[in-house]
Amino acid sequence: MSSATPTPGPSPVRRLSLAGVLRLRRPSEIWFKPALSSVAAVAPPNLLLLAFGRLDLAMYTMAGSLCALYAHNRPYAARARTLAWVVLGMLGGLAVALVTASLTRDAVVLLTVGALLAAVQKALCDAGRVGPPGNVILTFISSAALFAPQTLAQVPGHLALAAAAGVWAWLVGMAPALVRPHGPERRATAQALNAAAAYAATRGTGDGHASAHASARAAGFAAVQAAWQTLLSLPATGARATTRYALERLVVRAEVALAAPADTDPERLRSWAHALRGGGRIPRTGDAPADGDELLGVDAELAARPAPLWRRLGPLAPIAVRTGLGCALAGYASLALGIGRPYWALVTAAALYQANITLTWSRAVQRVVGNLAGVLLFAAIAPLAHLAQVVLVLCCLALNFGAEALITRNYWLGSVCVTPMALLVTEFAGYQAPGDLMTERAVDTLVGALVGFLAAVVVTNRRAGNRVEQAVTEADRARERAARLLAEPAPAPGALEAARRSLAAALTDLRATADAAAGEWWGRALPQERVVLAEQSGHRTLAETVRRQAARPDRDTGTRTEDVRP
């Protein structure tokens, strides 16, 4: 274990930069899937309500329909579970909101309940690793429902509408399994191979650009770890297990490439990744006997029980407190200004909170820019939408598609479509003066972003430094276990591979934890020296395990270079 110590003294205040906050990225590889799913899930319920002349009930059906936005990167067995939990979570939040709205019209009480719901939704979504869009959709629906006129007698019927739409959203989310049942896991494996190829192309040197080299290595390990999490969520028996085992061999090759980039052919990794597109045969690595031993390490991960929910929630307490406090104060501030829909400010604040304050600042800037641009887009769309209710519904569907199609380029670009869509939805129950809607939305955006970010500054995450210390300790322990096995002349079958996998996961977690902690303000000094030394020694040990396994006599090729090269 490293003997380096943390640098003493308080951590300085970090600059909050605007550079790159609004820069557009390449679109997600599957950007069209959530976009099409959202339209397929929202359109039928809304068009049915339009046909029956009850478009005023669309808020309740949309609560269920918007669940189709979740879990698009998960294998279908895991997606089915995740979507079910999202639908139940949506119904739970909606039920609390509707019952509260039926019992009181006190705006302060309603905002307080909304803020508490937002904090709970944020913590549970992050602890459960639900993925985008996270808690924002749940908070938007529950907060809007708090301010909808309601009686206790109406609550069961409204919940039934949301439940029916939620079932439909579940079916929409699972429908692609009929066409490409192994798509998500093939995609995750391809991403791991491409990320490993990008790092292998540097030959482990980075050509003098240390930061780019470290970034490529961290991205590679993160992609490999994500691929393992995807594959380990698949069934261990049955027809799908055959596909899982074939993909696991490819992920092993990506992992080996990260540990020994100089001995890897990047083009071969890329060709395997390309072959995984579509529904063709999964490429073979050509060294199945060796892979059989390497995959023994998978059994250890399958047998490991996940950490209990309360342990996963513990580190998220500061983020939950930020969310609850920021949402409450933003709502109160909007109410004090006389805004008719203070829950818009609450939702704006809820959308800001990320893993650290630096990322929260970036999201605040993106939210303000996107919402204000969206208000201007609403001004252009409103005259068309007011021609007829069917046009209003079609405009909302088009904006829904645009939001999901663009949001992977940058959050602010998706918000340009989300904002006018939210404004148009308020007109499902009746005509609203466009000028008032635009003014209230703009003011609520500014109030929610300002107050919400100030709450993030006040509520510091002092646990971030402790989590880095723990991550360094875990990485050192994993390295020591691998080093002890390397010292043995003949370790047990699969033991060295399991140790290597454990070390790779520990190093991935260390990098993610250190990056998150580095973005906090006013935290205590981080053990930067220990982090650097743990990463350097850990990656050297990873390379040693690869060289040790490459030298085993049971390899097919019998030469060291051929054995290491995927």
Image (tube, rainbow, N blue to C red):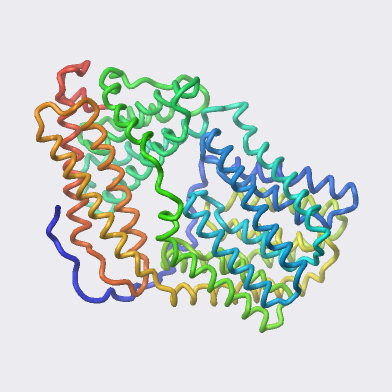
Q: For residue 549, which quarter of the picture? A: top left
* Residue 508 drawn at (x, y percent): 31, 47
Q: Residue placed at 49% from the left, 62% from the top?
A: 22
> What residue occupies the far top of the structure in this picture?
556
Q: Residue placed at 87% from the left, 58% from the top?
A: 387
Q: Residue placed at 15% from the left, 24% from the top?
A: 560
Q: Nearer the viewer, residue 38 or 353?
A: 353
* Residue 470 drawn at (x, y percent): 27, 57
Q: For residue 528, which quarter of the picture? A: bottom left
Q: Nearer the viewer, residue 200 or 137?
A: 137
Which quarter of the rendered picture does the C terminus lie within? top left
Give the vertical position of 29 relative to 146 (above or below). above
Q: For residue 37, which quarter of the picture? A: top right
How many marks can you see?
A: 0
Give the vertical position of 164 relative to 238 (above or below). below
Give the vertical position of 190 relative to 275 (above or below). below
Image check: 224 left or right of 475?
right
* Residue 377 drawn at (x, y percent): 69, 63
Give the vertical position of 516 relative to 483 (above or below). below
Image check: 254 left or right of 538?
right
* Residue 198 drawn at (x, y percent): 33, 40
Q: Nearer the viewer, residue 112 or 275?
A: 112
